[in-house]
Image (cartoon, rainbow, N blue to C red):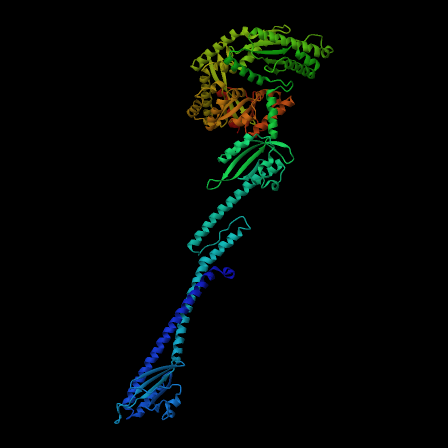
Amino acid sequence: MSRLAALPLALRVTLPLLALILGVMAGESWLRWRTLQAHTLLEVQERLLGRATTLAWTAERHWQARPDEVRALIRFLSSTPGHLATVLTDEHGSVLAAHRHDWEGRPVAEILPSFALPPPSSPGTKHWRTEHETLLLAVAWRPHDAPSARLDQPPGWLLLIHDPRAELAGRLREHRRAFALNAALSLGIVLLLGGLIHWRGGRPLQALTRALSATATSNSYRPPDLRGAVPELRALGLALEQAMSSLFSHQERLRLLEKAIEVSPAQVMITDTQPSIVYVNRAFTEVTGYRCDEVEGKNPRILQSGKTPRETYLDLWTRLQAGRPWSGEFINRRKDGKEYVEFAHIAPVFDDEGSITHYVAVKHDITEQQRLSERLSYLLTHDPLTGLANRQLLLERIALRLVQGQHSHESFALIVFDLDHFAAINDRLGSHAGDAILRRIAHTLVHRLTNCDTIARLESDEFAVLTDAQPSASKATELAWELARTIAHDLDRSTQPLLAERFPPTRLTVSTGIVVFPDEFGNAQEVLAAAALALQHALQSQEPGAIRLYESLSADLLARRGTIEQGLRAALAGSDEHCLDVHYQGQFDAARRLIGAEALLRFTHARLGRVPPSECIAVAERSELIFLLGAWILRRALSDAMRWRQELRWDGTLSVNVSAHGLRDPDFVDRVLALLAETGYPAQRLVLELKETTALSYLGGLERVMRRLAEAGVRWSIDDFGTGIFGPHYLARLPLSEIKIDQSFIQRAPHETRTQRLIHAMVEMAGAFSFRTIAEGVEDDDQLLALRAYPELVLQGWGLARPEPAEAFAQRLAQAAGQR
């Protein structure tokens, strides 16, 4: 069979066919020969019988009268092919005449001993005998022409002996010639068929085989020449070409995917359903320390440290077995025993029937990122020098106290301290001595107050204490006086030896400002501003250790708020008495290209003059006015930006600030989408900015609002980033695309290494989340030089462009377009 399989296709097809045809022809030829042989013998017998009948009739009528005539006829018959003997005997068996003269008169038993015949019974009796392929025909005869002939005279025999082999041999030769001719014709047909099969079938198949075999050593498939092939093979060749093209395309894609997975910084692990590990990439081995052969076939639990909560694994397998992906964190252990934290996304893999066959896990080592995040979160909410809360954390705590007070009707006090003459101490003794004093004040406050109070360092020598519930302003004043005296007394004991040598002997004192809330206050900024205003009055009194309470200032503040609110309502109604406008401040990339603009509110009251935007927003947030004002700003900004797109082909982003109260509007999302549709401005170029404190104070509802607008293409940005506790957890949770580093970091960057490190950490974290990062408040060349290390930063500030009306900003855009 192996030898037959090695033959060409045409031979494998035609040889059995030829053998079958020849076999059938041979069988048919044998049957025909047998039939022809029988027919030939029958013809010979018929001829022999005819001759015998003729000769017997002649002998019966002419033997007595003309015996020579009978002999002549016998000699004539002897000349026919196949004749062996013709003998005419009498009733005694003596030869009367024969084809040979020497036989006459001799007994027939002598000359033909093998042909013994019985005596004939009557004339016309025929007797056939075959011996050694020789035919013997004996016919009884009796002469009729003798005068003495009697009817009772016994007849004699007329013997004819004939050998049919010569005739059969002739017929056989003719039969063989016919067989040979038919065989040759069949062979020719089969050979022609074989050639056709080879040309139209075998040759194309060989070409296809060679082409397919060549793919084992090359990464390409060269389609063979199939001209002359049957249509089915041409269709097969075309199908193979398409299949091989698709196969190589898939192989190339698989190769690229394999390479991408192998060089990916993310760990990739594939397990079966047991689960047993079947594949890990290079990042996995680098992170865990295990080689591929050490983990293949093992259960992933070899990485467990025992510190991941059991509920995490229960949730993992519940989701995976339900056919859903899972994401979460593990605390695992490396091969060397060190623990690490990783974030994993695990998904099931299904076959065509929908059954789970494998699990694919993509994991990231977030140990360092988590450590950095925790450190950054701490630095963003605490003062590095004293370890106290910073301004932003204090504002958050004030906001919580506001909510608590509004619900429980409790009062709280915010006390702000400022060390008198601290600038002079710093100038004479240096910053090291000043820092020591500040740390001493922080130490005193921490040990004097309870854990329910919040202690913060606001700036330089300014501290704040947010107390637990206070029954009245007088009690808050007593606490403030006691704290101020304690601070002064402690400083007097601890720092007087240090100050005596280089500073005139004097007793250090602190000035104090107090505000009791939540009455009359809508947000934390107002509370802190009120306390700062009270402190300012205490400092302006020039009294050592002065204490001022905010109560006496509230009437003027309420009157100013009412005036501003009336002016805003009139301006929104279309009054020309007050000026409500939107200015735009440019945002630039590292090459100073204008790539964005921030819309900024500007309000000029007819009597009060220019009102700060923060104050306008604070007044508007006390009523539904914030909804009207927010919609007016957004419509105006979108209309201006759309006009710039159409007239100046500008494709920059438009940033618009959103307040916390504005987000509480149930129609906020619909209003934004309606304004986008009304103006035609693309949602993808609109950036809505939220202050960090706004996001934290309204996180639950904010997330739903942000996601609905993000699905429509609107981008979200966190403003004043770094001034609160907005950590990586919130960055990953909310659909953000941008952060704006607070200007306080930018202003300190040229001179403070710690601030530079904080900026670096924020830029790195933004890059990890693929956020655009804006540095706001850039005002001078020193700040630009400090930020040069971060070419990915977008820059905004008065040092680059001041806020300007829409017409002036359009001229700036036109100039920038002309320079391009």
Q: In the displayed structure, would residue 802 be above or below residue 106?
A: above
Please provide percent x and percent y for residue 586: 53, 23
In the picture, measured across the screen, residue 187 lies left or right of residue 784, that is left
Please provide percent x and percent y for residue 505: 71, 8
| Among the 4 quarters of the image, the one containing residue 194 | bottom left
Residue at 40 percent across and 86 percent down: it is 114
Q: In the displayed structure, would residue 680 be above or below residue 495?
A: below
Q: Is residue 649 visible?
A: no
Label tally: 0
In the picture, measured across the screen, residue 283 lies left or right of residue 145, that is right
- 471 and 725: which is toward the camera: 471
Residue at the extreme right of the image, as rendered: 501
In the picture, measured across the screen, residue 624 lies left or right of residue 433, that is left
Please provide percent x and percent y for residue 636: 45, 20
Q: In the displayed structure, would residue 72 be above or below residue 730?
A: below
Q: Is residue 203 visible?
A: yes
| Among the 4 quarters of the image, the one containing residue 774 | top right
- 274 and 102: which is toward the camera: 274
Please provide percent x and percent y for residue 217: 55, 51
Q: In the displayed structure, would residue 272 be above or below residue 789?
A: below
- 791 and 664: which is toward the camera: 664
In the picture, measured across the screen, residue 20 lies left or right of residue 373, that is left
